[in-house]
Image (cartoon, helix red, strand yellow):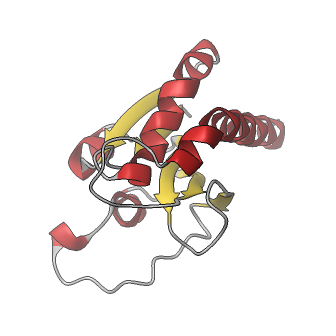
Amino acid sequence: MKAKVIALGNILMEDDGIGIRILENIKEELTHNNVESISGETDVEYCISQVKDGDFIFIIDASYNGKVPGTITVASLQDYKCKKKYYTQHSYSFIDLIGVYYKSLTGFIIEIEAASISFKLGLSHNLQNKLKSISKDVLKNIFLRLNDRAWEEK
């Protein structure tokens, strides 16, 4: 099992890039703890190519669910359900495709509530002011779940 953190998002779309910015902040600590960091941005094919069956992954991405901006929501991959119906391969997201291609892949989706998603380079002031704190909390969530996983495997 290889632990990997995959950040998704578009840094040209304001808070949609929060996952990328968080990964930039925590990458050194992850590497020091033998966790691979992957900045997938919006490239679904690249993300799929970096994952192997049996990996334990964390996906960091922006969400827009009506919560307070900066709120962190964590869901297991097994419990995460997409509500969309698709008709072409190009309509699928990375999260949808890993469920199709990788049957023994486990992990978590870490969603960060966005304040604003628009055509703008950089985060909103709201998330920019919270970035350090959010990054620290995301890192804690990752290490907590990695420790739980290690404990379960014993």
Residue 55 locus on image (x, y percent): 51, 41
**Residue 53 in sight from this viewpoint:** no
The image position of residue 96, as x and y in percent, is 38, 67
Which residue is rendered at x = 55% and y = 26% of the image? 25
Answer yes or no: is residue 38 visible: yes
Report the residue that reaches farthest toward the front: 125
Q: Report the residue that reaches farthest toward the top.
A: 32
Q: 102 or 60: which is nearer to us?
A: 60
Counting the numbered discs, the total is 0
Q: Quadrant of the N terminus?
A: top right
Residue displayed at 71% across by 37% down: 146
Q: Residue 30, relative to residue 130: is it above or below?
A: above
Q: Residue at x 56, y 61 (%)?
A: 77
Q: Is residue 85 left or right of residue 56?
A: left
Tell me where residue 86 sits by quadrant.
bottom left
Residue 54, percent from left and from top: 51, 44
Q: Quadrant of residue 79?
A: bottom right
Q: Quadrant of the C terminus?
A: top right
Percent x, y of residue 111: 57, 57
Dividing the picture into quarters, in which one does residue 83 lie? bottom left
Residue at the image position 32 percent from the left and 86 percent from the top: 85
Residue 64 vertical placement versus 151 (above, below): below
Query: Compared with residue 104, is residue 80 higher up or lower down, i.e. above or below?
Result: below
